[in-house]
Amino acid sequence: MPKGQSTAAQHARREARQGSKYTIALRRQQAGGGEGQVVQFLAPVLCEHVHVVSGIGAAWARQGLRVLLLRERRWESPRPRMRMVPRKGRRLPSWVVEDPAPRSGPKTEVLWSAQEGTGQLSDMLMHWDAEEEGSNGWDVHLREALVTARRDFDLVVLVPCFESYLWRPFAEADHLFALTDVGDLPRSERRLALNGSEQLPLERQLTPRQSAAILRDRHLSFLHDQDHRHQVAVRGVICHGATAVRDVAPAFYDSVSLDMTESGLPLLGWVTLPRKFRPHVPSAELAGDDPFVTAHAVAADAALRTLPLVCPSR
């Protein structure tokens, strides 16, 4: 042990001997011995992007971070329903109300864990009562869960369930990212041009600056909607689609990325997925799929570098 080494460095070296990355362990100790940060992704319908969030979380876990996907699920008291009950020797329909089941507490499941080191991806399901939403009951339960999650994990990612299209409590997030399904970067535009009495389709190529402007106007305009109002600045945007844009037109992609950075909304990465993923629930199968996680590695690394005190080592 080097003489005069700080306590944080000593703990980091101890974690490094167990397989963790020294830089990540050191930053974790300097941040307060494991005080985690809350990350939230914004999208028009975020439940359709859960697979991307899961892939990014799994990529972070493979860098030695302890990542928690904190999911919500709506819980409602059972309503009256029609059931056949015997009455005077006959079976007649009648309204009955079953005893309400108690709301279950948070359930945590480990989706992926490194054989050596501290890298781990976990999933926590948390129920909230619709009747308590108006009285801020949900916010109370969320804060209670985050107190424990911040202590036990490096990053906590808020993930909505299928019944919800976005997470409401933006105030609980420390960092925000935008997600959008573009398919392909706009490189050309088609319009109808008059040729005498006929209208003929006219196609023209777009410049990288024009492509970036269309990307912001058509695919990121939801950031200015009332439902997505937030006080925390969006650190960047991650696009995903079936076209490998960085391989097809790398120079064009780099120019679009430069313009996005100059506009204040950096393009952090492009996730190429050859087929449609529509699982609305994170699963161990996806978290352990190496090709799937590798597709998110570059974007996850760029997003991680924008977060203070959490940075992968090289």
Image (tube, grey):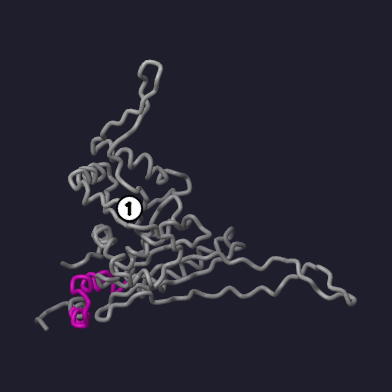
Which residue is found at the position 47% from the left and 70% from the top?
A: 125
Please identify the quadrant where the C terminus is shown: bottom left
Residue 215 higher or lower than 196, as above or below: below
Judge left or right: residue 78 versus residue 277.
right
> Which element type, helix, strand or loop, lies under badge 1?
loop
In the picture as drawn, the residue positioned furthest to the right comes out as: 88
> Number of numbered discs present?
1
Residue 190 higher or lower than 168, as above or below: above
In the picture as drawn, the residue positioned furthest to the left comes out as: 3
In the picture as drawn, the residue positioned furthest to the top comes out as: 196
Nearest to the observer: residue 242 or residue 40:
242
Rendered location of residue 255, percent (x, y): 20, 43
Nearest to the observer: residue 301 or residue 208:
208
Rendered location of residue 95, percent (x, y): 78, 67
Nearest to the observer: residue 313 or residue 214:
214
Rendered location of residue 155, percent (x, y): 33, 67
Please identify the quadrant where the N terminus is shown: bottom left
Type of secondary structure dominating the magenta stretch = helix
Q: Is residue 21 magenta?
A: yes
Residue 261 higher or lower than 291, as above or below: above
Nearest to the observer: residue 57 or residue 21:
57
* Residue 86: quarter of image: bottom right
For the magenta stretch, what is the residue range?
Answer: 13-35
Rendered location of residue 247, percent (x, y): 21, 51
Residue on which disc 1 sits: 242
Judge left or right: residue 5 versus residue 229.
left
Which residue is found at the position 75% from the left and 66% from the top?
A: 82
Which residue is found at the position 34% from the left and 54% from the top?
A: 177
Mark 1: few/some/many CA within 10 Å (<14, 14-19, 20+) = some
Q: Amino acid at mark 1?
A: Ala
Q: Is residue 276 magenta?
A: no
